[in-house]
Image (tube, grey):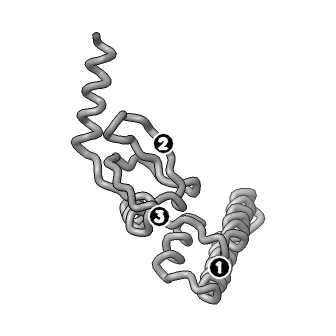
């Protein structure tokens, strides 16, 4: 009985805060967006309370944009994935060197600025929108 009551309460809470979303096939669904990462968006579906991750490739462009706006997130475009991964790795290495005392704060900032500059230039050359570049830079830091 208590479990049934909990499930009903959970379903009510999800339904009260759910939004409408659309997949690539144009099918609408009601769900609450609870998380986002490079794998996709995690939803709690109003219909059955199930939690599922939908990859960005399964969401409509409008729903993908809405997810990214809510979380101030940008999935890494495939054409700059290697550059993004290299920038993340470089920034981690700079932080490690700084923490180990092998770089001064000033030198670390210079190197970090250089990594971000190179990343931005490559993204611009590959036609990545400036708002996506800014969101990706936040993830690199």
Say if residue 104 shows up in the picture: no
Height in image: 133 above or below 52? below
Say if residue 109 shows up in the picture: yes
Q: Nearer the viewer, mark 3 or mark 1?
A: 3
Calculate the distance from the C-alpha at mark 3 to the C-alpha at mark 2.
19 Å
Pointer 3 local density, CA inside 10 Å: few below 14, some 14–19, many at least 20: many
Q: Secondary structure at mark 2?
A: strand
Where in the figure is residue 87, as x and y percent of width and height? 68, 70
Circle 1 is placed at which residue position? Answer: 119
Q: Quadrant of the C terminus?
A: bottom right
Q: Residue at x 44, y 38 (%)?
A: 51
Q: Residue at x 60, y 71 (%)?
A: 77
Where in the figure is residue 13, as x and y percent of width and height? 25, 36
Where in the figure is residue 85, as x and y percent of width and height? 70, 66
Q: Which mark is residue 73?
A: 3
Q: Secondary structure at mark 3?
A: loop
Circle 2 is placed at which residue position? Answer: 52
User: Position of 137 compared to 100: left or right?
Assistant: left
């Amino acid at each position: 009985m208590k479990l049934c009551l909990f499930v009903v309460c959970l379903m009510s809470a999800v339904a009260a805060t759910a939004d409408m979303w659309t997949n690539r096939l144009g099918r609408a669904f009601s769900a609450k967006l609870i998380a986002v990462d490079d794998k996709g968006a995690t939803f709690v579906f109003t219909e059955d309370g199930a939690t599922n991750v939908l990859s960005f490739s399964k969401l409509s462009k409008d729903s993908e944009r809405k997810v990214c706006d809510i979380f101030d997130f940008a999935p890494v475009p495939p054409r700059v994935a290697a550059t993004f991964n290299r920038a993340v790795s470089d920034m981690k290495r700079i932080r490690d060197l700084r923490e180990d005392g092998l770089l001064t704060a000033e030198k670390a900032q210079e190197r970090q600025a250089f990594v971000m500059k190179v990343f931005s230039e490559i993204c611009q050359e590959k036609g990545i929108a400036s708002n996506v570049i800014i969101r990706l830079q936040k993830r690199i830091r």
